[in-house]
Image (spheres, helix red, strand yellow):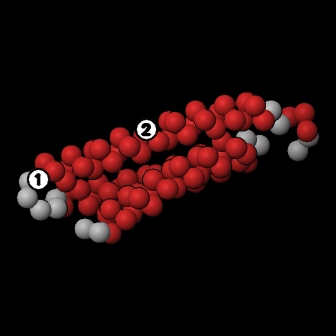
Amino acid sequence: MARGREPSTGRQAVMGVALLVGGVVVVWGLLFVHGITGWSEGGGVAPAASVFAWRTTWCLATGAVVTGAGLLASGWRIPGAVQLMVLGIGALKFHSLAAGH
């Protein structure tokens, strides 16, 4: 890849911070919905919460691979790595929630 075609480090850093904030907001929102799903059934652990956690695990893992690898392949190394880490860690969190039920 030619040096002139790669995005600057500053642009990559700004995009990385934006994706970090956006990814964290999405994961926290999904955690909130998971908590509401489990709480709304009352009493014990709701089966719907486990199903939601498994589906969310697959969605976050797929999103991490598709967007992170796409950004890395197009030369955006910092945002690609951030996207892989944030969505990957979110997928692992939901995997642990789903496996615990």
Expressed as whole percent of the image width and height from the top left, the position of residue 66 reads: 58, 50
Which residue is the extreme one toward the left?
43
The residue carrying pointer 1 sits among few (fewer than 14), some (14 to 19) or many (20 or more) residues within 10 Å by Cα, namely few
Expressed as whole percent of the image width and height from the top left, the position of residue 14 reads: 66, 31
User: What's the residue at 29%, 54% (across, down)?
Assistant: 52
Q: Secondary structure at mark 2?
A: helix
User: What's the residue at 26%, 61% (across, down)?
Assistant: 50
Marker disc for residue 41 = 1
The amino acid type found where label 1 is placed reads: Glu
- Would residue 44 appear left or right of 91 to someone viewing this image? left
Visible residue check, residue 72 = yes
Q: Quadrant of the C terminus?
A: bottom left
User: What's the residue at 65%, 49% (across, down)?
Assistant: 81
Expressed as whole percent of the image width and height from the top left, the position of residue 71 reads: 67, 43
User: What's the residue at 83%, 37% (across, down)?
Assistant: 6
Image quadrant of residue 18?
top right
Compute the Cα span from label 1 to label 2: 25 Å
The residue carrying pointer 2 sits among few (fewer than 14), some (14 to 19) or many (20 or more) residues within 10 Å by Cα, namely few
The amino acid type found where label 2 is placed reads: Val
Tell me: residue 20, above or below residue 93.
above
Visible residue check, residue 62 = no
Q: Which of marks 2 and 1 precedes in the sequence?
A: 2
- Would residue 13 appear left or right of 46 to someone viewing this image? right
Marker disc for residue 25 = 2
Q: Nearer the viewer, residue 64 or 92?
A: 92
- Would residue 17 appear left or right of 12 to someone viewing this image? left
Are discs 1 and 2 less than 8 Å apart at CB? no
